[in-house]
Amino acid sequence: MSAFVFKAEKIFYSTPNHNILLKDINFEYNEGDIVCLLGNNGAGKSTLIKICAGILSASFGNILINKNNIKCIGKTQQSQLISWLPQSLYRAENFNVIEFLSLNSLRVSKNMQKSNSELPFDFSNALRDFDILDQAKKELILLSGGEWKRVQLARLWLRKAKILFLDEPDGDLDLKHKINLVGKCKEYAQKNKAIIFITSHDIHFAKMVANKICALNNGIFVWNSEADIFWSLNILQKLYGLNKNDENHFYSK
C-alpha cells in the first residue's frame, strides 16, 4: 500500500474585495509529518488551513489527497479523512463533556449517551490522555479555557482522521498540557499514519512538535522544509522582523 500523501498545487486565495491573501502555495507532505505554520498575524496561516480542510475554496489551485482532488471527494468521506480544530468554538449550553464528545460519534449508541454508569472505554481513554477525565460530567460553560481546549482535542483524537488541522491548539494551555500535546501529536501521527498541520505563535511549542516548518509572510511561503534546517538557520529574525537580541532571546535555553 502506498504512503498517504497530502498536496497543495498553486493555491491562490483572494477575498470578494480582491484582496489577495495567499499566493502560489505549493507543498507535499506524507504520513507521519507534523507541519507547523509560522508567521505574523494576518500572514495567511488560518486561511490556508481552512482551504486545506475544505472549509474555504481556493480562488485558484488544487488540494489533493492521494492524488484525488478534494473537490471530488464527497463531504461524508471528507469528514472521515479530515478533522479541524478552530481557534475558538462555541460552547453549547446544557451539554456536558461526555455529551459533547458523543455528538456525531458513530461509535456511540443512544444508550451510551444517556447512561449515567461507567464511561464508554474510548471516551475514558481520550479524556485521560488529555487530563480531563475528572471533568467528564461537567457542563461545557463551566470549564476553564484550558479545560475546554483539551476537551476539543480529545474529541478530535477520538475520530482518528488521517489529517488534522489544528489552529493554535496550544492556546489556553499551560506548560504541562502543551508538553503533553506535543507527545500526543507525535504519537497520533505515527500510530494513525496521519498528517498534522498546526498553526502556533509559540516558538518553543513549534520547535518541540514539528518535523516540518512552513513560514508564511503576506500570504507567500518564505520557507517550506525540514524543521531542523529552519531552526539551525535562525530565520525567525527575518520572518518576524526581530532584532538580534530578540532572536537570541527566543533561542536561549
Image: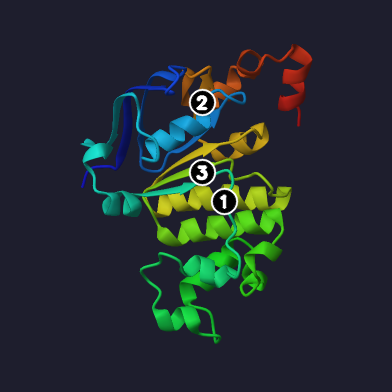
User: What residue lies at 63% left-to-right and 38% top-to-bottom?
Assistant: 205
Residue beneath disc 1: 89
Asked if residue 89 shows in the view, the reply is yes
Q: Is residue 11 left or right of residue 87?
A: left
Residue, x 60% and y 35% (percent of image)?
A: 200
On screen, residue 79 above or below 129: above
Q: CA distance from mark 1 to mark 3?
A: 12 Å
Q: Quadrant of residue 17?
A: top left
Q: Report the amino acid beneath label 1.
A: Leu
Instruction: Say above or below: 5 vs 117.
Output: above
Look at mark 2 in the image and give the residue it sits on.
Answer: 44
Residue lying at 58% horizontally and 24% vertically, measured from the top left: 42
Name the amino acid, label 2: Gly
Residue projecting furthest to the front? 17
As helix, strand or loop, the secondary structure at mark 1 comes to loop
Picture coordinates of residue 82, whole percent (x, y): 37, 48
Q: Are marks 2 and 3 in contact (CB under 8 Å)?
A: no
**Looking at the picture, how far across and down is residue 14, in whole percent?**
42, 21
Camera-side mark, 1 or 3:
1
Q: Earlier in the sequence, mark 1 or mark 2?
A: 2
Q: Tell me if residue 65 can be seen.
A: no
Query: Looking at the image, is 197 positioned above or below residue 235?
Result: below
Front-most of residues 241 and 175: 241
| In the depicted structure, whether residue 190 falls above or below residue 228 | below
Check residue 166 in the rendering and tell me which mark sits there, or answer none: 3
Structural crowding at the residue carrying mark 3, measured as other residues with C-alpha within 10 Å and reported as few (<14), some (14–19) or many (≥20): many
Give the camera-side residue of 187 and 111: 111
> In x, y percent, where is residue 189?
44, 48
Badge 2, how many Cα within 10 Å: few under 14, some, many 20+? many
